[in-house]
Image (spheres, rainbow, N blue to C red):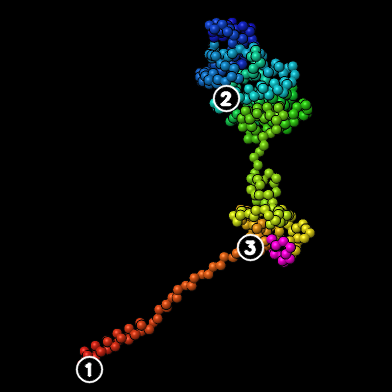
Amino acid sequence: MLPKNIGKYRILDKVGAGGMAVVYLGQEEVFERQVAVKVLPSHLGQDPDNRERFRREAKAIASLEHAAVVPVYDYGQDGEQLFLVMRYMQGGSLKDRLTHGRIPLPAAATIIRRVASALDKAHSMGMIHRDIKPGNILFDLEDNPYITDFGLVKMVESSVQLTHSEFFGTPAYTSPEQCQGDKEIDGRADVYSLTAMFFHMVTGNPPYESNNAMALLMKHVADPIPQLAATAPDLPAALQKVIERGMAKLPADRYATTGEMAKDVDRAASGAPEPARPQAPVGWGSSSASAPATESAPPVSFESLRASRAGEPARGEDMPTRKDSFAPGKIPAAAGSAFPEMSDDSEATNALDFRAIPTERRRLEWTPQADSTPLPPAGSAAPAVSPFATTKPAASYTEPPKPLEKKASGIPILVFVVFILIISLVYFAAQKGLF
């Protein structure tokens, strides 16, 4: 039998009932709008402490303003019953829609994105939902999803002594830490429940199923993470990584936020590749193709050196030489070579001039110079000149002679000492009357 009124709200119909509350469709007389009146268990209103706790929690829920959270209009007490007044969502629940089968992946990704944004906002305010499930996702007439029942699980858990037969939450989507009765949980419990709900949305089946509630709870704790390919092989394979991370048994292995999980869902649904990880810096001696090339001029070959001697302008003295273009120890044979005395395995052909490379990699070796060998006169049979010779005149330099240093002699000092000794003896003799 429907109550006629609850507080100042006229009751029109019963919308639904669950383990924690009964929901009625009510009419607000002042604004003439329909509202949802959620009546909590009567035993909560019997204790003054519970009533005060309910008041604080209701105010906290009302302060959570987000486009995807069902707004709370009012709260109060009618006899022994506590109640909340919220916006009436005429589009039904996600639970109703799942009775017709799977949710298409694009629509599921949109729902997850919107719900995750609301959860992140709640978590930033220190609020954890604790009971994310299809029945708590409601729609308006434009098919926009909303979360409802924020904080109700916490209010009931803090007001009721739990026993072995009582569990608050929904076993089909509850995190392992909640299944094991952990008192300290954080937003990653909601990450698990949101991922489990997403699995149900895209496959049409909950991640774990059992006719026994306790057995179902243990599946969340001990059973392997479900595989999408077993129930929906047409889904992108990348979604499996989302399921495995979002439903990890340990909170530390899950997404830190629901927003991160939603981004990966969008990426997998769109077929976009995973973001590239930053490459480690390439050190010396690495053969990686991605290593940045050192700044250098094009390789200089012996053919170009011969051409420069034939009339091309010679390089300036300040221009560094470059690494030869031939492989180590290999010089192509040429008829009438200008270097008959050089063997084909000369190591000098592949040496690096120490001026052309960084200091820490310098090799003090020689390399042919473009302006190092003069051309013999035309028709001359002058002997070949080594390519390592130079035409630059050697700068002669003679160090100026150092001035001769006069060494101190000990003779003047000896004469001075003898003179003083003689004067002393004469003075002593005169004093004694020897003269």
Residue 45, by quadrant, is: top right
Overall secondary structure of the magenta section? loop
Residue at the image position 69 percent from the left and 18 percent from the top: 95
Q: Nearer the viewer, mark 3 or mark 1?
A: 3
Residue 426, by quadrant, is: bottom left
Residue 98, by quadrant, is: top right
Residue at the image position 62 percent from the left and 18 percent from the top: 146
Label 3, label 1: how many angstroms apart (C-alpha)?
Answer: 90 Å
**Horizontal and vertical percent position of residue 239:** 72, 29
| Tag of residue 391 | 3
Side (left or right) of 52 relative to 430: right
Label whose residue precedes the other's in the sequence (3 or 1): 3
Label 3 SS: loop
**Horizontal and vertical percent position of residue 352:** 66, 57
Q: Quadrant of the image for the C terminus?
A: bottom left
Does the segment drawn in magenta span residue 381? yes
| Tag of residue 122 | 2
Q: Nearer the viewer, mark 3 or mark 2?
A: 3
Does the segment drawn in magenta span residue 434? no
Does the CB distance between marks 1 and 2 fall below 8 Å?
no
Does the CB distance between marks 3 and 1 fall below 8 Å?
no
- Magenta stretch, residue numbers: 375-386
Residue at the image position 61 percent from the left and 62 percent from the top: 392
